[in-house]
Structure formats: C-alpha cells, structure tokens
Amino acid sequence: MSDMHHPHENQNNDMTSPAESKYWLSLEQWANDPEFIEMAKQEFKSTPLREGNEKEEGWARREFLKLMGASMALATASCVRRPVQKIVPYAKQPEELTFAVPNFYTSTWSDGGESFGLLVKTREGRPIKVEGNPNHPLNKGALSARAQAHILSLYDPERLKGPKKVDGGKASDVKWDDVDAEIVKQLGKGGVVVLTGNMTGPTMKALVTDFCSGFKAKHVVWEAISYEEIREGQKASYGDDLIPFYHFDKAKVIVSVDADFLGTWIAPTAFNRQFSSGRKDIKSMNRLVVFDSMYSLTGANADLRYKIKPSLQLDVVMGLAHEIVVKKSQSKFAGNASVKAALEPFAGAAQKLGIEPSKFTQVAEDLWKNKGESLVVAGGLQGSASHAKELQIAVNFLNSVLENDGRTVDAKAAFNLKGSNKDLFQLIESMKKGEVKTLIVHRANPMYAVTADMGFAEALKKVEMVIYTGDRVDEMGAVSNYVLPDHHPMETWGDSEFADGVLSIHQPTIRPLYDTRSLQLSLMTWAFMAKVGPKRLTTPEIFYDYLREFWKTDLYPKFGKGKSFDAFWDEVLQTGVISTGKVEKASGSGRNFKTEALSNVKPVKSEGTELVLYPTVQFYDGTLANVAWLHELPDPVTKVTWDNYVSVSIATAQKLSAKEGEYMEVTVGSKKIEVPLHIQPGLHDDVVSVAVGYGRTGAGKVGNNIGANAYALAQWSKDGVVYSGLSASLKKTGKKTQLACTQGHHSMEGRKIVVEATLAEYMKDNGANNHKHKVFSIWSGHQYNGQKWGMSLDLNLCTGCSACVTACQAENNIPVVGKKYMLEGREMHWIRIDRYYVGAPENAEAVFQPVMCQHCDNAPCETVCPVAATTHSSDGLNDMAYNRCVGTRYCANNCPYKVRRYNWFEYTTQTEKPLHLQYNPEVTVRPRGVMEKCTFCVQRIKSARNQAKIDKRDMKDGDVQTACQQSCPTDAIVFGDVNDPESKVSKIFKTEPRAYALLEEFNAAPAVRYSVKIRNNGQATRNQDGAHKGGHA
Amino acid sequence: MMKRNQLVLGNKTLKDITEDIVKPVETLPSKQWLSLFLSAKVLLLFYISMIAIIIANGMGLLGVNNPVAWGTMIITFVFWIGIGHAGTLISAILFLFRQKWRTSVARTAEAMTVFAVMTAGIFPLIHTGRPWLDFWLFPYPNQRGPLWTNFRSPLLWDVFAVSTYATVSAVFWYIGMVPDLATIRDRAVHPLRKKIYGILSFGWRGTAKQWSHFEMLYMLLAGLSTPLVLSVHTIVSFDFAVSNVPGWHTTIFPPYFVAGAIFSGFGMVVTLMTLVRIGFPQFKDYITIDHMEVMNKIIMATGLMVGYAYGSEFFIAWYSGNAYEKFAFINRAFGPYAWSYWIMICCNVVIPQLFWKKSFRRSIPIMFTVSIFVNIGMWFERFVITVTSLHRDFLPSSWGMYAWSFFDTGVLVGSFGLFLTLFLLYLRVLPAISIAEVKPVMNVGKETHGGHHG
C-alpha cells in the first residue's frame, strides 16, 4: 500500500543504489543523474513551497502565509485582557449558608484583660468582622478597638502552620504523634507546672484542674497586667480575695486615682458604657474627678483633672478621707481613734498635692453629699507603685466611709481576674531550685513582660522540657523546647465568665486554618495517653464534648430551668450569653471595713522624677503587637502611632533642653531603655511616663522592634511588681526620630470647632455657647423626597476611646500605610478622632471630636471634580464612584473637613495572604490613584433596604447601624433618616439645642451634627477663647 | 519728538540680516551648543524616568499628602503656563499696538511660549492618580449615559483654556515663520534641506497676494491670541479662586495671576535672550540693549503690580473679617512656611526695584541675575499659594506640612530638561529672529529716515 502511495520515495531510495534497481523509467534515472534526483525529490513540478535555492529566494508564499497566520493568532491571543477564570458555586450548598449573605455567630474574646461577647460576621465560611453581642450585659453590642482588631491575628501570615521543635532558637517541623509520645513520657516524671494567662472560662478552668489532678501538676495564672493589688487590698480590707464589680453608672461623683477605667483598666468598654449612661441626662450628670499621673484617657475625659505624682496617690485618697472623717467628723468612722490616727498624717494633703485646698475640700464634700452614689477607684499599672496595696486599702476605706460598698462597688459580683505576679515569682524561685521538670506555657509571655533581672531565662534552663502553645516562635517560643501552636480563638471552642453571673459561650467561626491543636485537646490527649486524671477528662475525644458535658453537668442544672439540655444548649449558642443579672444590679450589701488594715497606710516620700508605666488602648499588654491596625490607631490622647515614647511635661522638656522626638535614655536603677521624647501638656513636672506593650522582638514582621520594651524597667520582688512611681532619670542620647503623630496641631485657635459649656451654663440655657449663624444661599438646595441620612455625635458622651476608628477600618477594607507614610500625612482612616487641648498648656484639658465625611448638602467636593466622580445621591449621601475617579485630588483640597483619603499607592494588592481573607466583600477595595472617604456605610444601608423590601415593609429607625455607631460603647453616635420625624436622629437635628453643624457659617450644610460638650466642673462659665494659642507644629 | 534709537545696529544690509539670522541653521553646531544640548538631553531623560517611576508607583512618591493634596506638579504647571504669557504678549498684543521693537524678540519669545505650554501641559496630565484615564477629562461622546465631564469644575475649564492656548500659540508661531522658512529653503544647497524646508514653508513664494493674505491672517491670529493672554491665566487662577480654601478663595486672583504671568514670562525672556546673545553674537545687533531695557521696564512694572496684589490680599484678609482668611495670610508671612513667602517677596517685589536705575536696566549681568531671581520668585509665589494655603485650613487637627521628596525635585528640575531641549533645538533648526519682520524696521532710528513713524 505504502509503496503505491509513495512511489517517489521508493524510487529515491532505489536511486541511491543503482546496482540494486530493477526498474527504471528514464535514462536519467537509470544513470542516477543528480539533476533528476533533485527533481524527483519535489512532489510537484512547480512547487508552491519554494523553488530553487532556499537560501537565495527567502520565504515561500505558503510558509509566509503560515507564519503570518500564526503570528496573527499569537498577537490576538496576547490581546486577551484577562484570562478566563471560572468560578463555581457551591456544588452542595452547606446548610444555613446562602452565597453572599453573611452569617453571624456568637462568641467570646479576651486578651487577658476585658472579655467581650461577640457576634462574628462570616461570609462564605470566613470571619470578616467582629461585632459586639448586644445580649452581653457588659459590652452590650459595643467592642473595643483591640477586640475589633484581633480578627487580623487569625489571618496573620506569620502564624505557625504546625507543631515545632525548637532548639537554640531554631524551629523544625515535628509530628503531633511524636511530640505527644515524648511529652507523655516527660510528664510522667512529675514536677509539671501549667503556666497560663488569666482564664475566665469555667470549663477551661475545670479542664486544667482535671489535668493537674491527674499529673499532680501545679497551675499558675499570670498576666502582665494582673490587678493583683486590688485583690490584695480587698483581702486586707474585707477579707475577700477578689476584684469587685464597679457600677460607674450608679455613681454621681467618681474619683479616679490613676485608674484609667475609660482606657485600659479592667473592663473599659463596659465602664465607658456605664460612665456615659450617667451623663446622658445632663441635668443630673455625674462628675468625674481624676488625679492623674500620666495623661490618661480617663483624665482627658475628667470634669476636673489634677496632675499628681504616683508617690502622692495615697495623699489623695487618705486626704479626702481625712477631710470627711476627721475634719468634718462625718461617717460611722468619725469617732474611731485608730482611724483618726491613721488619717492624721494626711492632714495637709491638698498643699502637698499642690491643689487649692478649697477645691480639694470641694471634692471631698461632693463625695460625701453623694454618699452611696459615689465611687473611688485606683489601680492598674499606674496604680502599682510600691504602696499599691496600701492605696487599695485607702480606696476601700474611702468607699466604705462613703457607704459605696455594696452600691457602686459590689463584691457579690466579682471580676474573674486571677493573674498573680507573686505566684510567678514563686514559680521562678522553684524553677531555679530545679523543682520544675516540665513547664507548659499557655497565653503568657514572661520572656517579654518579666524583667531580665528576675532570671526567668536562666531558671528555664533548669526545666527539662518547656512546652509553649503560642502561635509563633516569639520571645517565649524561642526558649521553649516545643512550640505547639494553639488554635486561634476564632478557631476554638470555649466559654467565659468574665464577671460573676455573666457566662458567655465561645464558638469557633472557622475550621482551623493550619495544623494546630488547642491546649485543651492537648491536655486531654496527654491525660488519655498517660491514663491519668478523672474520667471526664480522658473519655471525650474532642474538647467540644468535654465542654458540652461540663455545661450539661455543671451549668445546665443552675441555668437551664425547665428546658431540655439540647434546647438550653441551642439557646446558649444562639444568644451567646447567660446573665444572672448580678452585674446589672448592685447587691446592696456593704461589707465591714477592717480598720486595722489602715495601720500600714503611711505617707510615702515624694522626691525626684518618678516613672509611670502604663498600658495603652491600642496594645494593652502587647499581645497583639503584630496587628497593623493597632499600630496605625493613634493613641487616643497623644495621637502618636507606631511608637512608644517617654512623655514629659513642657517645663521638664525645657529643663532637659530636649525636643519632641529626641531619643532619651530612661534609667531606673541599673536598667535602662531608649525611647523618643514626647512633650505632653498637662503632665506633672516630676513625672515621666512610658507605655508598655511595645519593643517586642518575637511578635512578627509588623510588631518587632517598634518602640522599646518598658516592662524592662519594672521592679520585681516577692511582694509584687512596681510599675509606677519608680525613681527614674532621663538623659539625652543625641539620636533623634520623628514621632508619627496624626494631629500636628493641638489648639482650636479660638475657632468654633468643639463647643463646650459648663453644667451651670447649660442649666441656664440648654443651648449654651452654641451660637447659631444665619446662613443663606441663593440656590434652592437639594430636594430629599424619600430618605435623607444624617448622623449625630454627642461630644458629651464621646470619650475618644477609638473603637469606632478600628471598627470602620475593619468594615471598610481600609489599608494601613506604616510609620513612614503616617509621617508624610498619608493615613487612610475614614473616621478620625480629633483631640484638642484647652486651657493653659501646663494644665491642659482635652476634648474629643470624631470627624468623618460630613455628607454635605452643598458639598464643596462635588462641584470641583472634573469627571463627576463624586456626586450627591437622592438620599443625601455624598457618593464616591471609585471607577470614575481619575485622582485629581481637587475634592480633597476643597473639603473643609479634610476627610477625604487618597490611595497614594496600590495598597490593596500589597496585602499579604491570607490577610486578604478578612476583606469585607460588600465593600469595594480601592485601586491606586483613587479618592475615598466615609460612605456612611452605604453597604449597610443597601442591605437594610433590601431586607425591608424582602420583608415587604418600610425601613424603620435602627435598621441601619453604621460600623462606628455599632462599636461605640457610649452611644455617642446616632445614625438614621432625618426625614423620618420619629427617628432618633431627626429629633436631635430638630430639637436638640446643643446640636450644631461643624463650620456652620461655611454653609456646606453637613448631614452631621455635633452636640455641645458639657463640663460638670462646678464653674460658672467656660470661656472658649481660653483655648491655648501655642500649639505644636 | 524724542529721537528713536536704532532697532537694528551695525548698518546692516538686507543680505546681512538674512545671513546673520540663518547662520545658526546653516552651519554646524558649536561645541558649546553641543555640550548644552547634551546636558539638556540628559536632564530630559532624567525627567522621563522620573515621570515613568511616578506613574508606575503612584503619586505617593511625591510630597503631596493630606492636607496638601496639590504640590510640585501643580506649582510647576502654573509656573510654566505663566512663563508662556510673555511670548503671546510680545507677539500678539505688541503687534496690535504696532510696537516695532517687538520684531526681533517676538519669534524667540513665542517659541518660549510654545515650549513652556508644552512643558506645563504635561503636569496636569501626570499629576492625576490614574493618568491612563486622563481622557475622561475631555467631553467626548461616549457610551456611559449621563456620565460626562462636570462643567462646573474649574479643572475642566483649565483643560479647555490650556489646550486652546497651546493650539493658538503654536499656530500663530508657525504661521509667522512661514516666509522665513521659505528664505531658508531658497538658500538651501543640499536637496534634503530644500525638501524639508520646502514642505515646512507650505510652498511660500512671496507673491504680493500671498503677503496680503499672510498679513491678514497674522493680524487675525494676533487678535485671537490677545484675549488668551488674559483668559488663560485667569482660568488657571480659577482653579484656586473658585475653590473655598482660605488663601485661594479671593477675587483678586485673575488680574494678579495675569500680571504675575507676564512678569515671570518677561523674566524668562530676559534670561533666554541674554543667553542667546552670548551664544550667537551676531544677534546682538538685532536684540539690542534697548530691547532688553524695554523688557526690564515691563518686569519692573508688572513686579509692582504683583507686589500690589500681595498687599491687597493682606488688606482684604483683614478687611473681610473672615477669621480663616486672616489666619491664612498671617500664617503665610509668619507660619512655618514664612521662608518661602519672604523668598517670594524678595525676588518679586524687592529685587526688580534695581531697575529704577537706568544703568542697571542696561547691564547684562544685572538683568540676567534679576531675571533669575524673578523666575525663582515666581515659582515660589505658586508654592506659597498652593502649599501654605492648604497646609493649614479650617480644622487645626488636620494641619500638616508638605512632605517634599526627591521626586518633587526630580520633576521640577527635569521639566527644565524638556524645555531646554526643545529650545536649543529650535535655535538650531528654525530662524530665531523673524527675518521678514526685522527687514522692514532696519531703518528705524537711522538718520536718513528721521526715525519714528509708528
């Protein structure tokens, strides 16, 4: 066959060997003429391919066509703009999950301090935003900045992907099975200690107890910020080792001595809510008097703020007690000789404090007048001086004098904060003696937060095996033998009882991303393998079973009245929280104060410069140091980002002849750190303050080496840790940096920006100091026939806590820019909180004002955009069409509120995976070169509108909550339809005499109203022109 | 009647004039020119790379930020646009006023205008965040329904103003050159040169009819250009005046900007002319000290106008009773950017006062120095207006500083690379003085003719 089809080939083959050829067609063939052979090779006589010599004649027509076709095809292919990417919907849609509809799950979170009830918003199975659980009696739907931001730690790219063995700081992969075997062998040797952070969950506590009983292990609870001094003071004063619950809402007069309860102290979000609820009815609003060593957020919100030194804390409290008990002979302690003897040394407290005696007396009188309805608090790191326990005794005494115990201070509902520095001290001692063979460390980082001179690192070397459950090889991980990463809190089950009678469930909201294992399951596994411990520990296969069983046996009988357990359990998961009402109502039963406790309360010597260490709103103890949102969140008072610093007063800075940003060496005894200087108005001249929580070295790429570790300056002893009132000295190092402060100027320059009035002025005229301008326009203005969105911000309620800033960042996919660009003024926050100082710089008072896009009716930005990328919507929103924006930035120039934010670089695509999983799919991510700004959470408006349509009803007030409003613990933000006469916001717009539009005379007609801040400081007038002129540029 | 000085020195014949003016076009470039050109070229390449890096990475490379969202690019844009105004003024307005002295400087001044507008025109295009979408700024028919340009935005007016200006100036400049290009064509020996200049001269034959048409067209174009001298910088000033930023929102801006533009333009003309005189010594007979003196007088006059505007702004800021505006001006003179304000005052108001003295007006080194100061001062004027107004406006919480970066310097310095490259090329390939216009005035001021007749 083939011969027939290819006769030429055969011939050709034949021709090469003429001797063998049998048949020939021509003489040329027979003679093997080369010309003939060449011709015979051609298929056609006249070839379409090429003729003659290839080299000379170039390309043939067919080849040319072929190549041209191919290159056309290639050229066309290269012009395809995007490769086809097919998306596939759920083949089997999971139950309860609709594509593009978010699911909310109740949960709980705590970073060792405050504990929150959460609603975690998930989309397609991934958590994207954390919101407060409205059912939770403490945070009631609000959430702190840190709680908002902790979602980023779930998607932290640097989390460990599985268990590691660490040797000499180097980590290598191991398998859980191998680790377990080795650990169980080790645990059998005894000498086991479990060191954990504070545990509020009853189940977790039970599990650790079970484990400890099985292995004869010891459990040590330690937190860097422990509030141990409060428990000790309570024990000495009343015999109760607990932290009582505080009712700031029931107090008419609140005196805080260095307790930053609006910023960081115990449960600031709950306390913000309580505190503000006592200020909503202005006529009977509370009075907050703060004696402040550093410039705390609480001090910034005080009606009366007095700067003190930590060594004078006792003088404040005992001095006030002296005024009441000795001078005025009031209270049941009036005749008590031992009390009198204890108080006598504090007779001249006002002079010692440098406060006008009449003013000091006034504070005491206010307290006494409101006895039973007042509250005195002290403590926290700022209150942890060498006399911390005595300070607590004095506070307890004063509260007892004022009959506050049982009313505003309630021991019947205690906070479950059990961290103990003393216990850790003991542990280190026994480690040094070699008594500890195995140390299991969970959610505690003593390598970072304990001073080096405690010798924890050396003591660890005597421990045979150190097991750490951190999610990365951090400071603690580097000195451990095994780092067995725990689940992220969002991946794990649990429960919490932050305050007595408030039980909340901790549900996971995502399957563990990596090969991690919860400590709970680890402990259960090891007990099972070693066959020790009670049955309930070793029987269940997973921690969920243990938890459910624990709730069934221990909690269900107490709370599950009349319901089946399954129904009870489902209800708990759904509502997220069970409350017995203990924290909502005070028990009313006061305790007897043991007056002998006062015998140790003696005045403290006060001399030289004193150092105060304090936690910040952003970082608290420093656990979340790798969360960029928190670095980018300006400190509520100083407005500095991405650094810690030593704050000194203006006079002290002059004395040191040091300028803002100059590096200072802060020395305490033999320990020193280097931090930049920050000049803080309103600070005591003899006080310098440095924030803890910075200077991490094992936090990760974001958080490492930002600032200096101020924990290193604390003084440890078996009696506790001194964080405050440390004798310190400052020296210039000659180095300099720039602090990335988001606010360059701190005075209002006499402009009507934040309007203030005293309570006295308000009582005379409810619209006090709120001067309305007559504004008119020659245009008719926009018509809003349907809805018109508006927002109101009550400056009297806003405490500047900054939860809204981070909530907005999480909701609206707002990028972080880092210190370099913060310095260049490229912060991206859609809502910012302006803080102005008022009054003389040395005693400056502060005011806060959240500013976001004001959605002006006569929006100056809209007219100047050449491409109409920003336009007015029919419901009063100032819309941004990102797609249309070419980025001339004219709108930003023309915005008098300077709320527009520009994408200076391509931020979104720089997001490291898997951090992008946090992005809210309902909000567009913005490309480079595009302007953005607050949208009034337009995505929430749209989804509420859709919901109303589905339900076939009109939208009602409260259907839309903006992210900032939702997280606000003080209800300072109200949002709604101004055209709806029944809405809260329209009532404020129309009837609130305190409400004013910012820069009203400018007649941009903003859709935001601010309400005058009222200071209950006992003064007749508040002169706005007293605003100090000399700001810092 | 005062005796008129000669406009053309050196007893030139008609042939001499042609020889002198076309000499740079017909000879090989000197070493000095080559070295200048290469430097300019390097600067231009640097400029191109700066722009490329900025477009590739984002506006964040520049010092613009919140609150100062406009910076070097807008400042330098206004600077170059302003420079252009002297050329149009000389060639159009002075033409209409029959100012014979303009003939020898008009061509180069106008070339300067065209190149300055080209240099300026690049800035608004690259200062946007997404320059590849700049075409959205033009109202072209599209399929986006009601989404069109926003005719209320001064930036849009700017688009029309600048593009009109660029077109009219270029046409005016080119039309005026046609007879001279024909002269070069006629003299050309090399066929290629003949071909190129033949095309460029549109087949000009110099017939009476052509001259008649030419004169008419030139007059019309001069008439068209004249309002542009006033309108372009008026509209550029609207970018600021129509906004509501204290320090921008002032009604004095249009005349103030126009005066400033002419001031800066003449500054640049003097700078360039002194250099041209050095580079091409034969031009000294055409661009005489008398010419320079007249321009220096204009510099002094417009400098005083600008100074008056500075004072007037302060007066109105006080007189208006507007606290924000008052603050803006006090902040200009005494705030953190006071140095830039005082540089501006010194360069624009104080230093030109030297020209009260005749010998200074006629001294090349002095006028060169003063003109450089005027250029610097006028750049700083735009810096002061743009940056100091924005950096502290209504809410003190948002006050900040401009974050000047390497790239700001890069685009500012680099833009001179573009301008100088174009200008140096122009000097070599086109007749830098109008032959056709100089010849009719060669006898002005000569004894035989009794001078002045205009």
Image (cartoon, coloured by chain):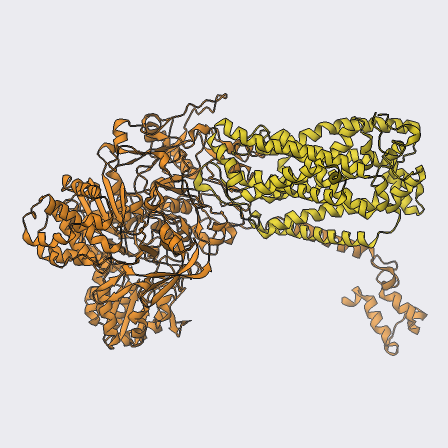
Residue A396 locus on image (x, y percent): 15, 51
The vertical placement of A60 against B249, above or below, is: below
Residue A9 locus on image (x, y percent): 81, 68
Q: Which chain is yellow?
A: B
The answer to whether residue B397 is left or right of residue A448 is right
Residue A462 locus on image (x, y percent): 29, 77
In the picture, which quadrant includes the N terminus of chain B?
Answer: top right
Residue B308 locus on image (x, y percent): 61, 31
The vertical placement of A111 against A161, above or below, is: above
The answer to whether residue B373 is left or right of residue A267 is right
Q: Which chain is orange?
A: A
The vertical placement of A597 against A863, above or below, is: below
Residue B382 at least partly seen: yes
In the depicted view, which residue is nearer to us: A459 or B433? B433
The residue depicted at 38 percent of the width and 72 percent of the height is A165
Which quadrant holds residue A768? top left
The answer to whether residue A875 is left or right of residue B313 is left
The answer to whether residue A835 is left or right of residue A431 is right
In the depicted view, which residue is nearer to us: A101 or A843? A843
In the depicted view, which residue is nearer to us: B384 or A504? B384
Badge count: 0
The residue depicted at 46 percent of the width and 58 percent of the height is A736
In the picture, which quadrant includes the C terminus of chain B?
Answer: top right
Residue B148 at least partly seen: no
- Which residue reaches farthest bottom? A19
Which quadrant holds residue B309? top right
